[in-house]
């Protein structure tokens, strides 16, 4: 019964949003502070992992809070280096995990395990 409840509160909601209100799903994914029930949060994360939110750009939504997590700002990088970090972020295979981590304000140690830019952030910070 729990799986059915999770489906109704998560996957089904995401599916309905994708088909009937994709802009609402994108808005939901962009709002890292929006309270969500756990099944819906997991469903949105899976949707992001599968690139089912077409206009979602990780570098726009997730990279700024990730940089704050590592205590580094965009000004610390040159224009070319920042563009490379953004490209890496947009190609990331852990978008859903990152999205959940940024929503829960995970620390740098947690993020270091999956962020493709973690080493560049750490290096720039001087650790």
Image (spheres, rainbow, N blue to C red):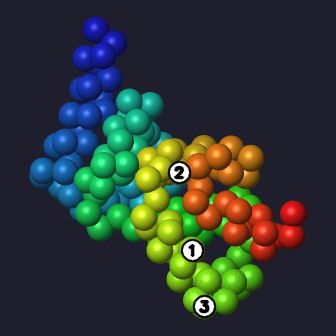
Q: Secondary structure at mark 1?
A: helix
* CA separation in Å, label 3 and label 1: 10 Å
Depicted 83 relative to depicted 15: above or below:
below
Q: Residue at x 28, y 8 (%)?
A: 1
Residue 52 rendering spot, x and y as whole percentages? 26, 53
| Circle 2 crowding by C-alpha within 10 Å: few under 14, some 14–19, many from 20 | many
Q: Nearer the viewer, residue 99 or 116?
A: 116
Residue 113 rendering spot, x and y as whole percentages? 65, 46
For marks 2 and 3, the one nearer the N-term is 3
Residue 30 lies in what quarter of the image? bottom left
Q: Nearer the viewer, residue 25 or 122?
A: 122
Locate residue 62 relative to residue 7 in the image: left or right. Answer: right
Foreground tag (2 vs 3)? 3
Residue 114 rendering spot, x and y as whole percentages? 59, 49
Whether residue 47 is visible to the viewer of this picture, yes or no, is yes
Residue 79: assigned label: 3
* CA separation in Å, label 2 and label 3: 24 Å
Residue 65 rendering spot, x and y as whole percentages? 62, 63
Residue 85: assigned label: 1
* CA separation in Å, label 2 and label 1: 15 Å
Q: Residue at x 74, y 47 (%)?
A: 109
Which residue is outermost to the left? 20
Depicted 48 relative to depicted 63: above or below:
above
Depicted 21 relative to depicted 113: above or below:
below
Q: Secondary structure at mark 2?
A: helix
| Circle 3 crowding by C-alpha within 10 Å: few under 14, some 14–19, many from 20 | few
Residue 98: assigned label: 2
Foreground tag (2 vs 1)? 1
Residue 59: assigned label: none
């Amino acid at each position: 019964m729990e799986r059915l409840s999770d489906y109704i509160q998560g996957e089904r909601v995401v599916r309905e949003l994708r088909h009937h209100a994709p802009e609402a799903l994108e808005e939901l994914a962009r709002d890292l502070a929006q309270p969500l029930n756990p099944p819906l949060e997991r469903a949105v994360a899976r949707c992001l992992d599968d690139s089912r939110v077409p206009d979602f750009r990780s570098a726009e939504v997730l990279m700024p809070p990730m940089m704050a997590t590592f205590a580094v700002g965009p000004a610390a990088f040159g224009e070319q280096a920042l563009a490379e970090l953004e490209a890496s972020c947009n190609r990331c295979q852990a978008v859903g995990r990152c999205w959940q981590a940024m929503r829960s304000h995970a620390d740098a140690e947690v993020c270091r395990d999956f962020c493709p830019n973690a080493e560049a952030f750490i290096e720039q910070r001087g650790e």
